[in-house]
Image: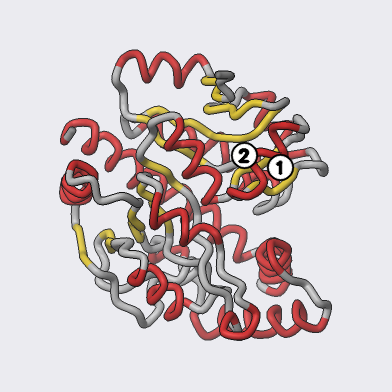
Amino acid sequence: MKSYIVFSEEVLNAKAAGQPIVALESTIISHGMPYPQNVETARAVEQIIRDNGAVPATIALIDGQIKIGLSYDELEMFGKSDNVAKVSRRDIGYLLATKQLGATTVAATMICADLAEIRMFVTGGIGGVHRGAETTMDISADLEELSKTDVAVVCAGAKSILDIGLTMEYLETKGVPVIGYETDELPAFYTRKSGFGVNFRADNPEVVAETLAVKWHLGLAGGAVIANPIPEADELDPEMINGIIEQALTEAKEKGIKGKDVTPFMLGKVKDLTDGKSLVANIALVKHNAVVGAKIAVALSNAR
C-alpha cells in the first residue's frame, strides 16, 4: 500500500530519537494571516517549540503527499501562494489525488498528526458551532474530529466569532474534555474570558500530560482541548471586540458568505475594524500556545 506520509529530516530524526514533537497547522499561514506576518509567525512559532524542548512539525499537502514538517522554502510558498486549498477531512483524498497544494485546518491537521503518531498539536483557536447554527447547521468539522482522533489541541479557546456556549455543549455531548490551562474559564481567542467554565483546570504541563496519557491508555478515543488564555498584556477589550464581531457577522450575512469562507472573511474584517490590533493579538496568542504546547509534549513524552 502506498504511503502518503513524508517526514522532513528534522521530524524524522526526532522520531528516531524519541523526542517530543508538536504538530502545527498550515491554514494559519495561507488563510489566517497576511504575508509576510504569516511566514514570520510560522517560523517564530517553530523556533519557540524548539526552544522549549520539542520539535515542530508544520503539516501541509504538497504534490500528492502529506508533508510532516515543512522546509524554509515551503513555508514561504504557502505564505505567498494564492492557490492553496483549505483542507478539512472531506478534502484530503481529492487534494492528494489531484496533487494540489493544501493547507490543513484543525481537523485535517489532527488526522495527519494521528497518522504520523504525533499526539500534541498547537493552533490559535478551534472552530466550533457558528452563531445561528440552529438554522444553518454550520458546525466546524474540528469538533467531530476532536471526538474521535487521539490528538490534544492547545488553543486560546474557540474563535470568538462562534457561539461558544453551543460549542461547549457539543464538546460535552461528544465526550471531549476541555482543560483550562491556568484558568477556570474558557478563553475566547482575543479575550481571556468567555463566561463559560472549563471542565477541568490544570496549572502545570505534567497534570495535562498525565490526564492525556491515562485517557489514551484506557482506550478512550478522541482528543482534548487545552484552553490557554491569550497573555493579559495582549488581550483586546471584550466590549470592543464583541461589537466588531457583531458588525462583521451582519456584513457576512448580507454578502451571503457561508461555510468555510466565513472564518477567513471574519478574521480579515475584524483585522480591518480593529486597525490591525486583532492580528497582533492573534500572533501573540499563537506564540503563547506554542510555549505551553511544547512543555506539555515534553511532559507527555516523559509520562508515557
Percent coordinates x, y for residue 94 in the rendering:
71, 40
| Image color mode | secondary structure
* Residue 254 appears anywhere in the view: yes
Q: What is the distance, in whole Å, between disc 1 and disc 2 at their CAs?
A: 6 Å
Mark 1: secondary structure:
loop
In the image, is residue 222 above or below residue 249? Answer: above
The one nearer the camera, 46 or 111, is 111
Q: Label 1: few (<14), some or many (≥20) within 10 Å?
A: few
How many marks can you see? Answer: 2
Tell me whether the residue at label 1 lies in contact with that at label 2, contact meaning CB atoms closer than 8 angstroms.
Answer: yes
Residue type of the residue flagged with mark 1:
Pro
Quarter of the image with the N terminus in it: top right
Q: Is residue 244 visible?
A: no
Viewer-closest of 252 and 239 = 252
- Disc 1 designates what residue? 36
> Quarter-wise, where is residue 53 in the image?
top left
Q: Give the residue at the far front of this rendering.
A: 1
Q: Horizontal placement of 145 versus 260: left or right? A: left
Amino acid type, mark 2: Glu
Disc 2: which residue: 40
